[in-house]
Image (tube, coloured by chain):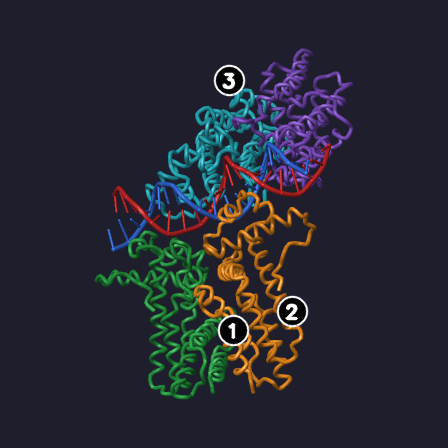
Chain colours: A orange, B green, C cyan, D purple, E red, F blue
Amino acid sequence: MRPESKPDRQMSFIEEARRAQIVASAIEVLASVGFAKASLAAIAKHAGISKGVISYHFAGKDELMEEIVTQIYTKIAEQVIARLEGQDTAVGMLRTYILSVAEHMRDHRTQLLALGEIFHNLRDAEGKPRYGAHTNEELYQGIEHIYRFGQSTGEFRDFDLRVMAITHSSAIDAMFAYWAVTPDHDLDAHARGLADFFERAAAK
Amino acid sequence: MRPESKPDRQMSFIEEARRAQIVASAIEVLASVGFAKASLAAIAKHAGISKGVISYHFAGKDELMEEIVTQIYTKIAEQVIARLEGQDTAVGMLRTYILSVAEHMRDHRTQLLALGEIFHNLRDAEGKPRYGAHTNEELYQGIEHIYRFGQSTGEFRDFDLRVMAITHSSAIDAMFAYWAVTPDHDLDAHARGLADFFERAAAK
Amino acid sequence: MRPESKPDRQMSFIEEARRAQIVASAIEVLASVGFAKASLAAIAKHAGISKGVISYHFAGKDELMEEIVTQIYTKIAEQVIARLEGQDTAVGMLRTYILSVAEHMRDHRTQLLALGEIFHNLRDAEGKPRYGAHTNEELYQGIEHIYRFGQSTGEFRDFDLRVMAITHSSAIDAMFAYWAVTPDHDLDAHARGLADFFERAAAK
Amino acid sequence: MRPESKPDRQMSFIEEARRAQIVASAIEVLASVGFAKASLAAIAKHAGISKGVISYHFAGKDELMEEIVTQIYTKIAEQVIARLEGQDTAVGMLRTYILSVAEHMRDHRTQLLALGEIFHNLRDAEGKPRYGAHTNEELYQGIEHIYRFGQSTGEFRDFDLRVMAITHSSAIDAMFAYWAVTPDHDLDAHARGLADFFERAAAK
DNA sequence: TATGAATGAGTTTTCATTCAT
DNA sequence: TATGAATGAAAACTCATTCAT
């Protein structure tokens, strides 16, 4: 899930701290004003540093954005994978996956908002989306793994794994997006509702 | 779902034609180079007209974008509503909704790509997303209407209608997004898979 | 001698006038502060226009610079070629060439200073010089033509034409460069001295 | 020809070594990417040191550039002067001068490329060229010395010494510039050709 | 001495918008 | 109505230089 990062040259403590500070500032700016207005100037101002510092620590805006994605993504994956340990049924994995992602969302709203901004907006040099269905392969395969396991144990019926993975993934994203603009929305209830949907839809 | 349009002052035939020409050009540019590179200059060049014309016929870039959304959205709604006529079971409506949207996608790929670009990128003056969960109310209510009907007839079990509507809507969007970057993907099979999914998820 | 120019799309009178104004301003700025400080901002300010105007009329700084080269070069070539008409001996051509270039220098000091700046400084995207020995081929061949004619008529002895062309060309450039920083220098006498030099160097 | 250097305060061995290392790195960078891209960062990276070191050892980029010029120029002069010893005719001196410079060029291509970059690009604070005809006085006088000697011995006819010196100097520079971009060019033949030109042009 | 970090001015370029014709 | 021209703000990025450690 590591979308290409810096060649792991050794970084000093200060360097790491600055990069972390810049990443944190960028996340906050992205979440509050959106990608298009998250200029390096805005990020620097929010962090209380000069524009040049960002250029000094990151090769360019793209590297900064990709670093943010990597960091946020890694954290989600870590949490979900940790929760998944100990589950031995496909249904259990399925519910745990959804509930633990929702839990993570509740605690990292700003990060996920920023992640969404980057996912929807970052483009490569030719104007093609940097992220999107084509970079979700690893994610889809992870989800498919759970459903395939369920099919192999007989818990689940036969269905197209990719369709299920896409639906699963998008349902979670939509849950977050809705909650993000409707803070009163009951995120946990939503997650339980989703878990029911997928459990029933997959069941024999 | 009419996201605010021009005050309905009478428009001349020429005016309408020009606006339609500009909208068509904008859709093609958005679909091919993405929102960020879809400058008025690019749209004008693609249409073979001067930049000034766009400013003359639209209050600004935002109005143009909103006009595009209105037009595309209206067409989808018309087609889906037409197909829905004659269905008298919730399951029938559900399946028809999904299959007819997929059919529309197959025939209007460019328009939907453009729609997605605008949805993900357009911001208001303060930087808040112009579209998103908060502008989908009408859409959600339409979907909820079907599921509520199913619950009232006893076809469907009891579940949270809003959660279902959000999931239903996102599943369709994700189907399109995946197909858009994976043209070999079997859109109709995907749609049938989704129909099965929601039928089972909602069933008693 | 036309080092690549705009595709000859039709230009309006105003467009031509603006481009000419910008070119003239750029020449003056180049001549007075040198290439490195001849920023678009400086050129615009000198012309009393906004920076954007330059971007509007030229694809980029490089196109502006190449347009300048083209214009200046074309004028010199026209004058020299006109003077060369009517000469029927190699010695006559040789002397006329040198004297008419010197005459042009006297009347177009600023332009030639600007030309020198661009020749010495303009680089392509990879950092290689845009002009230099490798783009002088046409110039060298023109000069060689005269000397070859002299060898064929028996006016001149046998020598390497390319070496002569390089020397001839550089001697003229150096005459200008010296005069440019030493305005009291007698340009015409220098030109006559050069003419004597090459006549004797080539003579049997 | 010593274009102003550091006040001759005593330098430690280490200091000298560092300066030499920096100068060597700068020459290579200048020759390979050109003046405009020869940033202190690039020079430091090429040398494997930090940017700060350069600032520490040189008052600024300009002093570094001038130091490079001094070093390269000094070496050429030493070689030419050494070769000139033992020549007792003006013609001999003339030919030796040209041939020994060409010989030096063959062995020090990188240095001379760097020298050319600096000559053409370095500017003082007001934007005026740091080098050029106005700083060549010492060079011109050295060359004039030879030709004046030839005139006094009767080997050479009467001509303007300055014109001859300028031409002589530029012919050598042009020989190098041509060879630099046309490595197959026969440098020695070119030098002999030049020597013939100057011998004949100066002869009675 | 040497370093990495930071600065801020300066670069080119893009763009939505305005306006006179 | 339509156009080409002009604007000026904002963008990302580069760079020589300074400075605390």
User: Can residue A27 be seen by looking at this rendering?
Assistant: yes
Discs 1, 2 touching: Cβ within 8 Å? no
Tell me what residue is drawn at x 35 percent, y 42 percent: C15
The amino acid beneath tag 2 is Ala
- Residue C186: which disc? 3
Q: Is residue C178 left or right of residue B8?
A: right
Q: Secondary structure at mark 1?
A: helix
The amino acid beneath tag 1 is Ala
The amino acid beneath tag 3 is Asp
Tell me the quadrant of the picture where the N terminus of chain B can be found: bottom left
How many neighbours does mark 3 have within 10 angstroms: few (below 14), some (14-19), or many (20 or more)?
A: few
Above or below, F13 against D200 in this view is below
Residue C125 % position (x, y): 56, 45
Residue C111 % position (x, y): 46, 30
Residue linked to disc 2: A82
Pinpoint the chain carrying mark 2. Answer: A
How far, Cα to Cα, is label 2 from label 3? 87 Å
Do callouts 2 and 3 point to residues on the same chain? no
Residue A118 % position (x, y): 51, 59
How many neighbours does mark 1 have within 10 angstroms: few (below 14), some (14-19), or many (20 or more)?
A: many
Do callouts 3 and 1 point to residues on the same chain? no
Q: Specify the quadrant of the image occupied by residue C135.
A: top right
Q: Nearer the viewer, mark 2 or mark 3?
A: 2
Q: Specify the quadrant of the image occupied by residue D125.
A: top right
Pinpoint the chain carrying mark 3. Answer: C
- Residue A191: which disc? 1
How many neighbours does mark 2 have within 10 angstroms: few (below 14), some (14-19), or many (20 or more)?
A: few
Q: Is residue A157 left or right of residue C19?
A: right
